[in-house]
Amino acid sequence: MRKLLFTLILVSIASAGLAQLKDLRPGFNLFSSQQDIQLGQEAAAQVAQQETVVPNAQLTGYLNNILMRLSSTPHGQSEFPYKANAIASKDINAFALPGGPIFVYTALIGEASNEAELAGVLAHEMTHVKLRHGTNQATQENLIELPLALAAKAAGNSMLGQLEKLGISLGVNSLLLKMSRSHESEADYNGAQTMAEAGYNPVAMAQFFQKLEAKGGRETGLTQFLSDHPNPGNRVKAVQNEVRLMPRRAYTTDSGQFPAIKQLVATIPVPPPKTPVPQK
Ligand SMILES: [Zn+2]
């Protein structure tokens, strides 16, 4: 018995020593990478019709500079062309579409305490794109019907139109936007690697999510974000465990522009909510 215990201890010490960072890869997918890009472009055009995309070059440039810094790292880079835009809204939200388009709501920028927190959301969203989580979910739920729908798209129809016939849209509980907890774990994991490689403290990402979750009960403007990015468990602890396996680095929290961007965002007018408030 004692010998067995001793062996068990040895094995666990050995496996702890072997623990190392993983390189996550996309799961099974019936869409081609090019189809992810086409779908994302169509969906982004729909978003631009429904939401108020902010036409401010300073803000868009700032967001895309962070994206560029993140996507030039080993874990941030992918085959997809990332592009960020801000949406003027009181809702605290951010989402990524397949193939690269990322939208960040002005109220979410207003909630971030520093650039690292905002970069954390971007690194998390970029990972949903890179690991193709949206079309992976659409694949899992529509294994039988998808090949025909994608073939119909090849015949020249709109991809979003074909997918809407299968119930896949950008609406509530969208398969393209509402992530599973395992996809969330992956987005946190690869997002943290991306953050660290870009020189941002990776824990800032998980801390920002935790801050938003703590606010969630009171702030209705967070419902969509928290529902699309469900907490996979203890986010901060998971990232802290991951960081222990990383080489030591010096991190920055800010490129120096964040305070000016926060001020700018506070001056951007938000449109009234689209859904009518029920009358008493
Ligand atoms: Zn997510």
Image: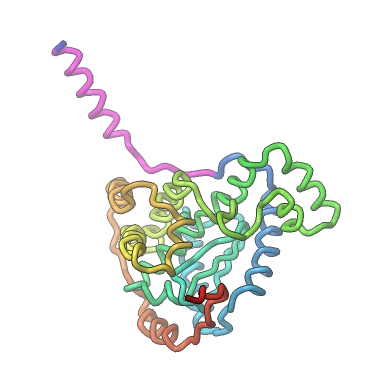
The residue under the point 84% across, 57% down is 156
Query: Does the magenta segment cover residue 11?
Result: yes
Answer with left or right where residue 7 lies relative to residue 246: left
The residue most toward the front is 280
The residue under the point 43% across, 52% down is 230
Task: Give coordinates of residue 66: x percent, y percent.
Answer: 46, 70
With respect to residue 202, does 119 lie above or below? below
The secondary structure that dominates the magenta segment is helix
With respect to residue 116, does 55 lie above or below? below
Please state, as top left, top right, bottom left or bottom right, where the N terminus lies in the image.
Answer: top left
Task: Give coordinates of residue 105: x percent, y percent.
Answer: 49, 73
Answer with left or right where residue 5 lies relative to residue 269: left
Query: Closer to the camera, 130 or 177?
Result: 177
Could you tell me how many numbered marks the image carries? 0
Q: Quadrant of residue 53?
A: bottom right
Query: Does the magenta segment cover residue 279?
Result: no
Q: Which residues are magenta?
A: 2-25
The residue under the point 62% across, 60% down is 170
Task: Give coordinates of residue 26: x percent, y percent.
Answer: 56, 44
